[in-house]
Amino acid sequence: MEAELKNIGCNFGSIINDNLIILSTKIKEKFIIIIDEWDYIIANNKFSSEEQRKYLSFLKDLIKDKPYNAFVYMTGILPIAKQLSQSTLNFFTEYSILEDDKYYQYFGFTGKEVKELCKINSKLKYKEICNWYNGYKAYNDDPIFNT
């Protein structure tokens, strides 16, 4: 694959954006960029403020107003707009599955489901599970338990 990319004109010493432009132009297709857990570097104390700033700058340079992008799909826990009010990533339309009245229940166990499981297994106590796990709340305050 590396040889094929070099034949197209990609340069592995170059920045990724340049190579994506070359590749997109050559194959006459746009890319769907998927970034899972986009917020890991932001939410993790292992990274300095400077590293977080550079990461956000990299993301902006990779995805904002690029002709090679069909669209960008990013998953994470932190809402981009709320977490990063001065963010360079202020050009997204955010969609939270937890605010969807139809589909939120399919992204973990609902509070009702966990209570039912606790009834089946008497060793499990709902309040203890709530203490162990600080999950999410859906638009209707229904707790959602997932990993």
Image: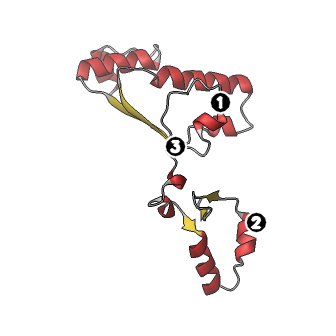
Local packing at callout 2 (Cα closer than 10 Å; few below 14, some 14-19, many 20+) is: few
Question: Can you identify the residue that label 1 sits on?
Answer: 85
Q: Amino acid at mark 3?
A: Thr
Q: Amino acid at mark 1?
A: Ser
- Tell whether 143 sits left or right of 73: right
Of label 3 and label 1, which has the lower sequence position? 3
**Res. 37 image quadrant:** top right
Instruction: Identify which residue is drawn at 49% across, 32% down.
Output: 92
* SS of the residue under disc 2: helix
- In this picture the colour scheme is secondary structure
Instruction: Identify which residue is drawn at 46% across, 22% down.
Output: 64
Instruction: Identify which residue is drawn at 45% across, 13% down.
Output: 14
Q: Position of residue 4 (x, y in %)?
A: 28, 23
Question: Can you identify the residue that label 3 sits on?
Answer: 75
* SS of the residue under disc 3: loop
Q: CA distance from mark 3 to mark 1?
A: 18 Å
